[in-house]
Image (tube, rainbow, N blue to C red):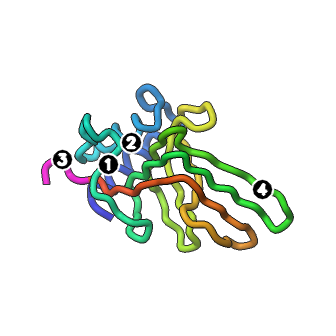
Amino acid sequence: MSDVGLRVYNHAVGQFGNKVGDGECWTLANASVIAAGGQPPSSNSLYNWGTAITLGQLSRGDIIQFSSYTVRIEDADGSWQELTRGAPRHTAIVETVRPNGEVVVLEANVDASQVVRRTTLYFQSGTVGTAEVTVSGSFDFYQVRPANP
């Protein structure tokens, strides 16, 4: 985890339960990047949050940019839940990457709520415990760059 990433996370988690700015998901990420001394996206590339990384490199304070993402989690008993993000886009900040493939994020502007909250998401289809996870759509992972390297 980079120092900037840790500061991005610390700012975001400090906003937990609160509305940041206009309550949009992008606003939480942008405010956290600026507060951390990171380089925010440029006006010609609003959804590029820094250095592109892979799922295996993902760590606390990194940014996830979604486009038409859906995850369906179906338990062995037939019950299921489905989460969607990014219609057309959504932005979240990584809190925890778990060995079983779960990624806990801090995000805003979800399900008609503009306050910062935690959500567990997945980025690979497969079996997790007794559940079958199916992921579709697209997402990009970014490590925030320092504003003045």
Q: CA distance from mark 3 to mark 2?
A: 15 Å
Which residue is identified by label 2? 29
Task: Report the residue that reaches farthest toward the left.
Answer: 148
Q: Earlier in the sequence, mark 3 or mark 2?
A: 2
Q: Can you tell which of label 4 and label 3 is closer to the viewer?
A: 4
Q: Earlier in the sequence, mark 4 or mark 2?
A: 2
* Mark 2 and mark 1 residues within 8 Å of each other at the beta carbon: yes
**How would you rate the neighbour count of disc 1 (Cα within 10 Å): few for under 14, some for 14-19, many for 20 or more?**
many
Horizontally, is 49 left or right of 124 in the view?
left
**Residue at 18% in and 47% down:** 147
Which residue is identified by label 1? 49
- Magenta range is 145-149
**Residue at 75% in and 61% down:** 74
Horizontally, is 5 left or right of 145 in the view?
right
Residue 116 coordinates in the image, percent (x, y): 51, 39
User: Is the stretch drawn in magenta largely helix, strand or loop?
Assistant: loop
Which residue is identified by label 4? 80
The amino acid sitting under disc 4 is: Trp
Q: Secondary structure at mark 4?
A: strand
Residue 23 coordinates in the image, percent (x, y): 48, 30
Q: Secondary structure at mark 3?
A: loop
Task: Report the residue that reaches farthest toward the right.
Answer: 77
Q: CA distance from mark 2 to mark 1?
A: 9 Å
Horizontally, is 82 left or right of 103 in the view?
right
Please name whichever residue, 109 or 2, is drawn nearer the observer in this view of the structure.
109
Residue 112 coordinates in the image, percent (x, y): 61, 31
Please name whichever residue, 88 or 55, is drawn nearer the observer in this view of the structure.
88
The amino acid sitting under disc 1 is: Trp
The amino acid sitting under disc 3 is: Ala
Which residue is identified by label 3? 147
